[in-house]
């Protein structure tokens, strides 16, 4: 079959856009992890993902309520518990990152039903402005069925795999929204199927994706720019074992995402 010139132009355009979108997501998405008394380069106890945003009134770190709860549980049982985020030196996919210890992290607001938490810490206003996505809260959800979205998540297994070589691994995902409700929208892939591709376009097996909770999800707008639409809340899959009822945090099932519109300018999360 002949490959038409238009097809090659469309493919090239898509590759350029995907690269731009990945760089954009990487700029505002951070690994959020915790341990005791050492750099996370050496050991991570547990982790999630988070994003840095600025509104008209303040700078905020956003993650999931269950991620923040897990850190608090660890902090309550481990003296010297330390919370960290990763900061990329540039937007390149293979660019270096360095860990930043968060001083005096404290929750601004948290809603367990929405699985959202907003956080601040000493020194947040001293970070470079370009690290913060300018977030303009909307009164209603912006994500709709059929919209294209992109996000980066720091799956714990991938992060730990990269630690010995001082590489901060992450997973970049592109999806079409399967359905949307008042509080969440869903990305759906049939469990047990192989639907991932590597950077060379080759099929990849599904992987354990625990740690991606808290990732900011960006919707592609009509002008091809990205808009923050939601926060990854839950990954649910029956894995690759023939549809058993047990669920796993695998990358080949459903991803539930809370609409970002519930977060307000001051970081509050009003009861929906």
Image (cartoon, helix red, strand yellow):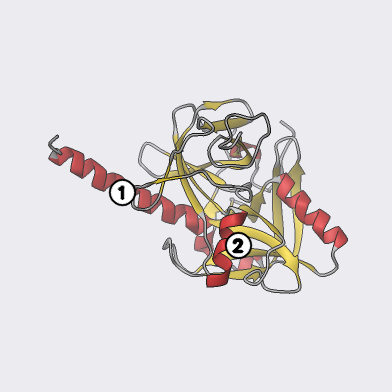
Mark drawn on residue 15: 1
Establish if 163 lies above or below 113.
Answer: below
Dot 2 falls on a residue whose secondary structure is helix
Check the image and name the residue furthest to the bottom: 38
Q: Quadrant of the C terminus?
A: top right
Towards the viewer: 130 or 197: 197
Q: Position of residue 65 (x, y in %)?
A: 73, 45
**Residue 93: percent from left, percent from top:** 43, 61
Position in image of residue 262 (x %, y %): 65, 37
- Position of the N terminus, as image quadrant, is top left
Is 109 rendered above or below residue 177?
below
Whole-percent x and y of residue 60?
64, 54
Res. 141 visible in picture: no
User: At 75% from the left edge and 45% from the top edge, which residue is drawn?
Assistant: 110
Pick the residue in front: 146 or 43.
Answer: 43
Residue 40 appears in which quarter of the rendering? bottom right
Residue 137 visible at all: yes
In front of the other: 130 or 173: 173
Residue beneath disc 2: 160
């Amino acid at each position: 079959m002949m490959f038409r010139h238009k097809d090659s132009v469309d493919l090239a355009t898509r590759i350029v856009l995907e690269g731009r979108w990945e760089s954009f997501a990487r700029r505002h998405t951070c690994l959020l992890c915790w341990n005791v008394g050492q750099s996370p380069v050496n050991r991570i106890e547990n982790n999630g993902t988070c994003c840095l945003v600025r509104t008209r009134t303040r700078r905020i770190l956003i993650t999931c309520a269950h991620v923040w709860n897990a850190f608090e549980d660890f902090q309550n049982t481990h003296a010297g518990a330390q919370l960290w985020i990763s900061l990329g030196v540039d937007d390149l996919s293979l660019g270096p990152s360095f860990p930043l210890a968060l001083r005096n992290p404290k929750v601004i607001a948290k809603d367990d039903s929405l699985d959202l938490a907003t956080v601040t810490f000493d020194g947040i206003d001293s970070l470079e402005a370009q690290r913060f996505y300018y977030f303009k809260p909307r009164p209603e959800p912006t994500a709709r069925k059929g919209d294209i979205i992109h996000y980066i998540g720091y799956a714990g297994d991938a992060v730990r795999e990269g630690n010995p070589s001082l590489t901060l691994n992450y997973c970049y995902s592109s999806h079409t929204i399967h359905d949307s409700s008042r509080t969440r929208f869903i990305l759906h892939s049939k469990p047990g199927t192989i639907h991932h591709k590597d950077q060379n376009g080759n099929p990849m097996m599904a992987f354990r994706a625990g740690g991606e909770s808290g990732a900011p999800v960006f919707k592609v707008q009509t002008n091809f720019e990205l808009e923050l639409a939601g926060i990854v809340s839950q990954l649910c899959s029956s894995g690759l074992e023939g549809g058993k009822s047990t669920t796993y945090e695998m990358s080949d099932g459903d991803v539930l995402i809370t609409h970002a519109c519930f977060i307000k300018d001051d970081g509050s999360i009003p009861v929906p």
